[in-house]
């Protein structure tokens, strides 16, 4: 009887382990037509040390996350994408650049050239063996232009995905810019499923598998004669907590390394609708702040505010990915009510943006909608 009890206890322990340590497959990721509400939290809420927790049977407690804005991640069928993209990414088995899901992003890619690559789109192929990206797309002078990767595609996960699985790869793409030259981009991805356990966020408590990916790369520009220069990208680490049947990561945190200093650059998590805070930190000198009009048309907005004493005000606009769109500093007088008109050299694409207002080393963050 005692031997049977020991065997039973061992069996239950093994079963508990099996249930807790999940495996991710293609059925756990998004499908074309899916939408997911995502909250964006302040980058300053946590230190990078919170990301070192790794290994088996972990508990990651992010229950205190507070959203400063929300957005909707939308995924569409490649067949409904712009016809110019279908030439490259049509969903046929013989197509090396085959895709079946598209995610349209907001904002644009600013280059040190008199052009902007607008409305970037990411193309994915989700199959039984992996989840990969065959390339991206942008609008160049209003024309949809595909940027497919070369022979190797960007494999984001391999299936079935289990603890300690790892993979690496490198991709490259090139875009010809008529009359100016060419834009080239490369990226290396090294990923590892480095932990499993329980994740707690304001959205709930879930069994998860964590995957971290190291991204490095560079962008280069060359004129029509072939002369140009390369711009290395800062090293980026992407940490994703994946759950069963969740479609997208339950939590995604990115860090960026600049001059050997690592800082959190983005915090996104799946969430329900939540009224977000209008600001992170209230500023004693800068008060009664508002953005008008909001939504705006994307060429300018006005910042209305009051000041207790004269001081500089820095206004920075970011895409939800954390990319800086533009920043300007203004001198404000000691007035009970005043107005600054913040303009953009390139009209913003439709979507949500973050506006950070800094004065006296204190920050307020607002969400700006562009229609």
Image (cartoon, helix red, strand yellow):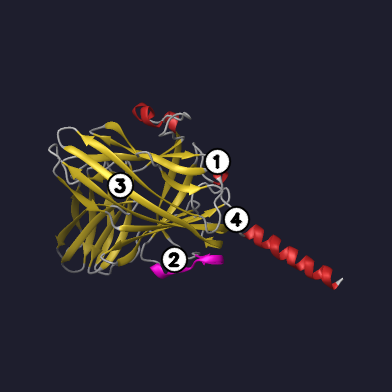
Q: Nearer the viewer, residue 5 or 118?
A: 5
Q: Which residue is mark 2?
A: 51
* 107 displayed left or right of 163: left
- Looking at the image, is mark 2 or mark 1 earlier in the sequence? 2
Residue 186, label in figure: 3
Which residues fall within the magenta stretch? 47-61
Q: Residue at x 45, y 63 (%)?
A: 65
Seen from this angle, which residue lies furthest bottom?
2
Q: Quadrant of the C terminus?
A: top left
Residue 128, label in figure: 1
Is 153 a magenta residue? no
Asked which quadrant contains residue 18, the reply is bottom right
Q: Nearer the viewer, residue 309 or 81?
A: 81
- Looking at the image, is mark 4 or mark 1 earlier in the sequence? 4
- Looking at the image, is mark 2 or mark 4 earlier in the sequence? 4
Q: Nearer the viewer, residue 144 or 127?
A: 127
Q: Quadrant of the N terminus?
A: bottom right
Q: Which residue is mark 4?
A: 22
Find numbered disc 1 in the image and state the secondary structure of the residue it sits on. loop
Q: Residue at x 28, y 35 (%)?
A: 139
């Amino acid at each position: 009887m005692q031997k049977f009890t020991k065997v039973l206890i061992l069996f239950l322990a093994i079963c508990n382990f099996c249930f807790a340590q999940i495996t991710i497959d293609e059925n756990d990721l998004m499908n074309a037509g899916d939408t997911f509400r995502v909250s964006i939290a302040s980058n300053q809420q946590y230190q990078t040390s919170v990301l070192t927790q790794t290994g088996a049977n972990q508990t990651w407690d992010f229950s205190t996350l507070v959203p400063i804005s929300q957005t909707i991640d939308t995924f569409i069928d490649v067949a409904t994408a712009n016809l110019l993209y279908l030439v490259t990414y049509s969903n046929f088995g013989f197509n090396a650049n085959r895709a079946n899901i598209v995610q349209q992003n907001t904002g644009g890619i600013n280059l040190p050239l008199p052009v902007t690559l607008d409305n970037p789109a990411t193309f994915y192929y989700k199959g039984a063996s992996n989840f990969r990206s065959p390339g991206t797309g942008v609008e160049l002078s209003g024309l949809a232009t595909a940027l497919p990767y070369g022979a190797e595609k960007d494999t984001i996960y391999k299936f079935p995905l289990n603890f300690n699985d790892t993979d690496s790869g490198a991709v490259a793409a090139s875009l010809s810019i008529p009359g100016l030259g060419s834009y080239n981009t490369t990226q290396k991805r090294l990923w590892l499923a480095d932990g499993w356990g329980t994740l707690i966020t304001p959205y709930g408590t879930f069994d998860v598998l964590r995957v971290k990916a190291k991204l490095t790369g560079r962008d280069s520009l060359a004129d029509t004669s072939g002369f140009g220069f390369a711009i290395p990208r800062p090293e980026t680490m992407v940490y994703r907590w994946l759950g069963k049947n969740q479609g997208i990561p339950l939590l995604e945190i990115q860090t960026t390394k600049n001059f050997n200093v690592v800082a959190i650059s983005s915090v996104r998590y799946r969430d329900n609708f939540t009224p977000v805070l209008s600001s992170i930190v209230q500023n004693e000198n800068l008060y009664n702040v508002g953005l008008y009009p909001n939504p705006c048309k994307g060429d300018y907005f006005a910042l209305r505010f009051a000041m207790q004493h004269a001081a500089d005000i820095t206004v920075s606009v970011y895409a939800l990915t954390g990319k800086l769109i533009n920043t300007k500093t203004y001198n404000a007088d000691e007035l009970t009510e005043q107005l600054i008109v913040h303009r953009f050299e390139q009209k913003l694409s439709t979507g949500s943006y973050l506006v950070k207002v800094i004065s006296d080393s204190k920050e307020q963050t607002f969400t700006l909608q562009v229609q």
